[in-house]
Image: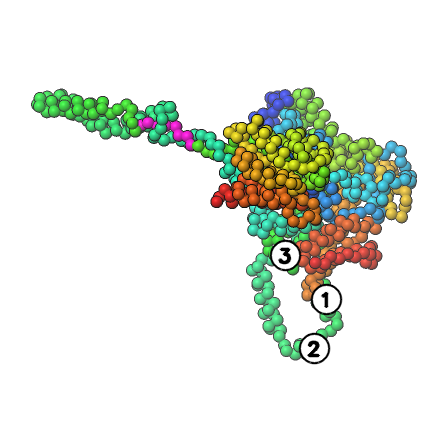
């Protein structure tokens, strides 16, 4: 017969799978939108998700349908003014057929706009599947430990004693040991009682009395608490990401760094930032720009404030060192740095910078990435590149890549962290 | 008035499960008084998100995964969140037991309305109407959906999501051409076929005479359909069926996917043909049943006022020049017609006696029941739309002809116009009027395996050009060889031609 079922609790979000299908299918559009978002957002806003627009035309599901033209009659309600034979002009756009209620045209041709969630945005940003691998690499790097509960053990310090567990096992032990004795005792008492009532010889009664006493004594000897009962709470150390990280963005903003190069740098910085936010609870950003001298600035100025002047890389590295010293002690902060430059450097600067990097900065940073964005048709290595190469060979937490085109940013980024995986495994 | 006095039902804005059960029981008793024959009901309470889910999969509780459902979901969700669109109060599935989904946000009165509407109105329609009886197996649909979903997902695992999606996309493009409008003869079983083959072979053996070989073959032989490549002998309007049975390229699993889409299309077919009747019937019964509850004094005035408020919203019909006009409202038209039939039975006027001599002074319950069982929208309107309703709705016909640069008012609600208005309105619900007539006419089985479709142009109405090419491309993907679409005008001349080659 009739049934009334409460379905509210199950099957929420059944369409999630269909939504994923939809996103997968329109990935090209979505990716384009995401690209646009990257360009116009600040690094810290990047992880918000956002609206994606897909042109209605690309979404339509085709069918055989009547177009406009041909002869139609349609019936409508609410006539107040017309008589048969009245002639009226076609309403605008009246291309004949399907006027009014016919199933013909009249669908809206608006673009289809929908909102990507933060996760969907990131997954497209990081291109799906690669991320988990990178995450593992990242966790392996972090050497902070945290103690977590992991059951109970038989040995430990008194402060970890679990009274409840200890009493439980003591009770169990007492029951197990006392059981057989108690049975014997009961039987002996019964025998004694019977012997007394039957007036057995005194010797026999005496023997039984002794037996009862002995059993009672044995029962009394079972300890209330024994060494073997003790249980201690167990804790194991698991690595956990330190909660705080700081990321230094270093960029050459001299005249030779044009918009294209800055855009490349921004993309790389963004990737690293997103990556770090997935790993650390809190990530601070420090922007250092340099021409022939270095300045700490805010993000706006960093990317958009035009500057001119020469190039002294060393100044930026030095400033970073000073800031670390002053604000980010190594014991509390995970320090990451990404440097972007077109590689122009002059005189003694490259060599000096490389040495400073190797001696002063690398020991205190977890990871230092150098991205070079040379001119499009430049061949051969810049001087800074050559000097840094030596550093890269000598250290594990330094990596360098050259990037010409925005499309290369992601592969390069991935490549950097791949390399790191191998390094950790080795 | 019923002699038995029932106690007042609990009332108030909030509902509870026990209260709903009480309402359901009273409504069931009342429906039985009117002789409504229904499948058992299963009433399920869902939240708005689940309602959106159900929307996205065209009301089916277990669709197979497909991106277009995701698109529909996102679209509905957005317009719902922005407040452009309210959600339906209920969705009902044509199955046995008949499943009705009720939204938890509904007030108690709404739930009562929806139970009467879906679980007794729609339900009895599903069980009674000839189209539903013929074409859908109510007791099997849920199992079939489960099977389809699982099958599609298994295929995805085995052949890749993309491959499966391609096939389903192509099938969806042809979905409205996956319908049998008349019942196919039962296919022969394999055993029968074997027996038949043996019989023929035996007959040939007995008749064998080598002399026949020497008889020259007459020219007339070439006219036989098979020899000329003229297959199928009769045009086939179920394109998906034809693809499923004869496509030279499809792998068995792809064929099964075609079949799944075709089955779904077939399942929806009766609903597309009975929108006005189905909604009219359900609306008529929620109106009648709840009014009966009030007559029995088991619900109070507050209940009725809230109910009438919703009811009026549902059956409102905007005029053609009013904002928000989207053509005829099937609820309004259907409800008005059902009410009107009852009126003609009970209190006929002279006009009714002239127009509907068979209806006047009959038992309205039986007359309505007959109408519900034996018609679809087109025939229902042409049979039962009364002049009185045409006047009430102030219906008029606009003619829009290609060779005329003005529109012409063809007829209005006057003595000369009634019949024509009625016919035109009925036509509007005819399948031919909603979708172009396209059928499979030729499959060159022994030649290049090409497939030819014919679009019989109806009153000069052309296809939407680009879209038609798109669909042809989809058909080509399923067929694997050249597909053609020829347009033929009323005189039988070929008027247009498109082709897709692999």
Crowd around label 2: few <14 · some 14–19 · many ≥20 (10 Å) = few
Position of residue B75 relative to residue B168, above or below, is above
- Quarter holding the N terminus of chain B? top right
Circle nearer the N terminus (1, 2): 2
Q: CA distance from mark 2 to mark 3?
A: 41 Å
Which secondary structure class fits the magenta region best? strand
Q: Which residue is mark 1?
A: B228
Instruction: State the residue at coordinates (65%, 51%).
Output: B167
Instruction: State the residue at coordinates (62%, 23%).
Output: B14
Q: Which residue is mark 3?
A: B250
Q: Nearer the viewer, residue B355 or A87?
A: A87
Q: The residue tagged with tag 2: helix, strand or loop?
A: loop
The quadrant in which residue B332 appears is top right
Same chain assignment for discs 1 and 2: yes
Q: Identify the subunit bearing mark 1.
A: B
Circle nearer the N terminus (2, 3): 2
Q: CA distance from mark 1 to mark 2?
A: 21 Å
Q: Which residues are magenta?
A: A229-236
Q: Is residue B330 left or right of residue B402?
A: left
Image coordinates for residue B497, horizontal then vertical, percent: 79, 57
Same chain assignment for discs 1 and 3: yes
Q: Identify the subunit bearing mark 3.
A: B
Q: Nearer the viewer, residue A289 or A211?
A: A289
Q: Which residue is mark 2?
A: B215
Q: Identify the subunit bearing mark 2.
A: B
Instruction: State the residue at coordinates (60%, 33%).
Output: A318
């Amino acid at each position: 017969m009739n049934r009334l079922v409460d379905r509210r609790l199950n099957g929420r979000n059944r369409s999630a799978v269909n939504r994923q299908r939809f996103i997968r299918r329109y990935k090209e559009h979505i990716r384009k939108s995401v690209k646009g978002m990257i360009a116009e957002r600040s690094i810290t806003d990047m992880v918000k998700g956002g609206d994606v627009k897909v042109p209605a035309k690309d979404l339509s599901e085709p069918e055989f349908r009547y177009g406009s033209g041909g002869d139609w009659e349609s019936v409508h309600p609410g006539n107040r003014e017309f008589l048969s034979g009245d002639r009226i002009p076609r309403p605008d756009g009246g291309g004949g057929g399907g006027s009014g209620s016919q199933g013909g045209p009249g669908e809206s041709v608006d673009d289809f706009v929908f909102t990507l969630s933060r996760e969907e945005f990131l997954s497209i940003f990081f291109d799906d599947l690669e991320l988990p691998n990178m995450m593992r690499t990242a966790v392996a790097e972090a050497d902070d430990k945290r103690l977590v509960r992991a059951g109970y053990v038989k040995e430990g310090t008194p402060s970890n004693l679990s009274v409840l567990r200890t009493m439980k096992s003591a009770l169990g032990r007492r029951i197990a040991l006392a059981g057989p004795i108690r049975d014997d005792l009961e039987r002996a008492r019964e025998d004694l009682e019977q012997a007394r009532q039957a007036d057995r010889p005194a010797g026999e009664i005496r023997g039984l009395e002794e037996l009862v006493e002995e059993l009672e004594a044995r029962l009394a000897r079972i300890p209330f608490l024994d060494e073997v009962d003790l249980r201690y709470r167990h804790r194991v150390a698991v690595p956990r990401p330190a909660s705080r990280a700081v990321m230094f963005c270093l960029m050459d903003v001299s005249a030779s760094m044009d918009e294209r190069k800055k855009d490349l740098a921004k993309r790389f910085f963004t990737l690293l930032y997103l990556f770090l936010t997935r790993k650390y609870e809190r990530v601070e950003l420090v922007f250092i720009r340099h021409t022939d001298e270095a300045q700490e600035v805010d993000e706006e100025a960093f990317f958009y404030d035009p500057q001119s002047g020469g190039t002294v890389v060393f100044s930026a590295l030095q400033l970073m060192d000073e800031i670390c010293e002053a604000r980010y002690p190594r014991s509390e902060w995970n320090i990451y740095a990404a440097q972007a430059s077109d590689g122009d450097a002059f005189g003694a600067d490259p060599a000096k910078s490389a040495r400073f990097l190797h001696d002063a900065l690398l020991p205190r940073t977890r990871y230092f990435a150098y991205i070079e964005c040379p001119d499009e048709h430049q061949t051969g290595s810049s001087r800074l590149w050559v000097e840094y190469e030596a550093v890269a060979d000598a250290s594990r937490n330094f990596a360098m890549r050259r990037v010409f085109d925005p499309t290369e940013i992601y592969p390069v980024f991935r490549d950097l962290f791949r390399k790191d995986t191998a390094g950790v495994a080795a | 008035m019923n002699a038995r006095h029932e106690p007042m039902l609990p009332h108030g804005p909030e509902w509870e499960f026990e209260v709903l059960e009480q309402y359901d029981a009273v409504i069931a008793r009342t429906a039985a008084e009117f002789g409504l024959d229904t499948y058992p009901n299963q009433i399920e309470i869902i939240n708005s998100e689940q309602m959106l889910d159900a929307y996205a999969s065209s009301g089916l509780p277990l669709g197979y995964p497909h991106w277009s459902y995701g698109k529909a979901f996102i679209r509905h969700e957005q317009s719902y969140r922005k407040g452009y669109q309210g959600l339906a109060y209920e969705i009902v599935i044509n199955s046995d037991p008949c499943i009705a989904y009720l939204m938890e946000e509904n007030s108690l009165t709404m739930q009562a309305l929806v139970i009467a509407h879906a679980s007794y109105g729609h339900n009895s329609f599903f069980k009674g109407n000839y189209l539903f009886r013929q074409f859908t197996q109510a007791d099997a649909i849920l199992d079939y959906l489960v099977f389809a979903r699982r099958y599609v997902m298994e295929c995805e695992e085995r052949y890749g999501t993309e491959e499966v999606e391609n096939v389903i996309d192509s099938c969806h493009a042809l979905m409205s051409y996956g319908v049998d409008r008349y019942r196919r003869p039962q296919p022969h079983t394999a055993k029968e076929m074997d027996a038949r083959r043996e019989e023929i072979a035996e007959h040939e053996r007995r008749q064998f005479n080598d002399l026949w070989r020497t008889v020259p073959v007459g020219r007339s032989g070439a006219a036989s359909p098979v020899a000329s490549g003229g297959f199928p002998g009769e045009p086939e309007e179920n394109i998906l069926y034809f693809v499923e049975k004869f496509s030279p390229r499809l792998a068995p699993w792809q064929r099964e996917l075609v079949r799944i889409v075709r089955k779904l299309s077939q399942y929806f077919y009766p609903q597309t043909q009975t929108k006005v009747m189905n909604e009219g019937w359900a609306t008529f019964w929620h109106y009648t049943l709840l009014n009966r509850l009030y007559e029995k004094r088991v619900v109070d005035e507050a209940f009725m006022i809230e109910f009438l408020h919703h009811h009026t919203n549902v059956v409102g019909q905007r005029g053609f020049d009013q904002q928000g006009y989207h053509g005829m409202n099937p609820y309004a038209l259907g409800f008005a017609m059902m009410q009107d039939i009852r009126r003609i039975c009970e209190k006929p006027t002279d006009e009714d006696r002239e127009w509907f001599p068979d209806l006047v002074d009959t038992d309205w319950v039986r007359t309505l029941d007959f109408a519900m069982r034996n018609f679809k929208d087109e025939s229902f309107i042409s049979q039962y739309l009364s002049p009185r309703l045409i006047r009430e709705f102030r219906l008029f016909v606009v003619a829009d002809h290609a060779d005329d640069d003005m529109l012409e008012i063809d007829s209005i609600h006057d003595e000369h116009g009634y019949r024509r208005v009625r016919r035109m309105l009925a036509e509007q619900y005819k399948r031919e009027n909603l979708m172009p007539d396209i059928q499979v006419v030729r499959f060159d089985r022994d030649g290049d395996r090409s497939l030819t479709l014919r679009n019989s142009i109806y009153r000069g109405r052309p296809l939407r050009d680009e879209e038609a090419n798109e669909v042809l491309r989809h058909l080509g993907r399923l067929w694997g060889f050249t597909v053609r679409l020829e347009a033929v005008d009323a005189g039988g001349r070929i008027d247009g031609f498109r082709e897709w080659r692999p």
